[in-house]
Image (spheres, grey):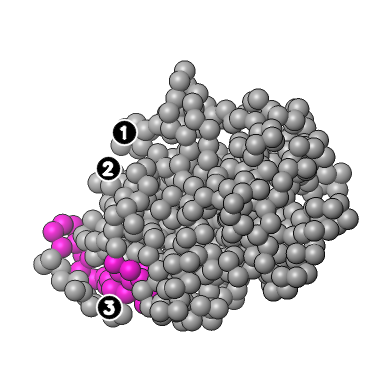
Amino acid sequence: MKPHGSRWKVAAAAVACSGAWLAWAAASTIDAAEEKAGGDTTVFEVGRNAFSFPVANLDEAGRTTFAIGNSFFRRNWVEAPSSTTARDGLGPHFLARSCGGCHVQDGRGAPPNTFRNGLATEQPIALLFRLSVMGADGKPQPEPTYGHQFTVAAAQGVKAEGKVRIQYTEVPGKFADGTRYSLRRPAYSFTSLGYGPMAPKTLVSPRIAPQMIGMGLLEAITEQDIVQNARDQAARSDAIRGMPNRVFDVYANREVIGRFGWKANAGSVAHQTASAFNGDIGITSAHFPLEECMPRQTDCAVAPRGTSAVLAAPAAVASAATAERAGTAPKGTSVEIDDATLEKVIAYTATLAVPARRNFDGVDVRRGQALFNQAQCAVCHRPSYTTGESPFPSLSRQKIYPYTDLLLHDMGSGLADGRPDELANGRQWRTPPLWGIGLVPDVNDHSFLLHDGRARNTLEAILWHGGEAEASRQQVLKMKREERDALVKFVNSL
């Protein structure tokens, strides 16, 4: 086993290459700690289950909570009324029947990938669509008929909101050495609309389900570090100018820096988890007590709700549920997942481990890392942090390597969705963490990347970068084939 937590010189004789690269390698160092991407929480796992292990230093009580949370994360919820009161309340509108339905094996979702006459023939499950229209005050408002999010499935007796139509157009390009490539540009539209047409000029933002690893560690990065990232970038002379999103967190009951989601529109694992239960599965909770049934969706409004609510004061909840059924209290007074169960799912989500890097000290990987730094990719994909205090002690004070600044960046017109999200404008996306990216094919049998899965591999994802990253993209376009291969090997080692 290689040494951990120390820096060591690479012997030049061990580097099987020549010229400037050999000189660079001889003089440089490897941070051996990088192998443990999650610090002491790191697990040394590969293969189908690589994203599904608890952090390595979790205690026995934590592992018990992890196992219970895992059960509620993976198993299907059912429509109410049903014989079970622990897992009913699915819908009325929903995308998936469980968290694991989108985050298969706690991994990354994929867009539909079967086509007929150029059109996707499947309906997306792990690819959701945010909707909004611009209000008179210049701020985004829910689309008046379909709300914040378009769903493709519904409970019995409730109309589905409709279907998503996906079509790709190939966009050819060429590297400086003459090698040709092609990117695929998606176009989205909605058909079979269940409640009538959408508002004109509806803004649409597609978002794929990301892998779940390391979320608790990202939450433990201090706000000071994230703010300092923005300050450091503001002091640069180039175009890179990241900014934090600021969002209201229902658990903290205050505005915080956003860290999760493709637009950094959630500030905590708890908020992100409860929000996803509500928006994606239609499961209400104490902080998200209402399902989104828009005024025209009358069948949604009267559909049966789950009755599994057992909050801190069960009698009060039961009374509220009775009042709700009697029509003397607003719908949503009772909830479908109780606090204790939801907290276990939150704990499960927060303590999913980051796998160790593979071949992190390989010659090509190191060369790729040098090129990654040379192209300024590491400015936004900041390699490392030491975490602050976490509600989960195992995650506190860990040296971690997520490769993100957690800031919003203008990524150019090619990736723009045109839909604002809190402080994020329609061209900005949060820098996604890169840890575990090379294991997505092992876990999920695909390599689709970016916010909507349009990139078919790592190199395509790099080539979609524009805006603040345009100069980096231009450097990649000038690289020779072996340099591009090394760059991809480095990214896929993370």
Where is mark 1, residue-wise?
179
Residue at 76% over, 37% down:
299
Where is mark 2, residue-wise?
481
Specify whether 5 is left or right of 279: left
Q: Residues within 10 Å of mark 3 (few under 14, many from 20)?
A: few
| Vertical order, 42 against 89 (above or below) | below
Specify whether 387 is left or right of 258: left
- Identified by mark 3, the residue type is His
Give whichever of discs 1 and 3 has the lower sequence position. 3
Give whichever of discs 1 and 2 has the lower sequence position. 1
Where is mark 3, residue-wise?
4
In this view, the mark in front (2 or 3)? 3
Residue at 46% over, 62% down:
70
Identify the magenta region. 15-44
- Identified by mark 2, the residue type is Arg
The residue furthest left is: 13
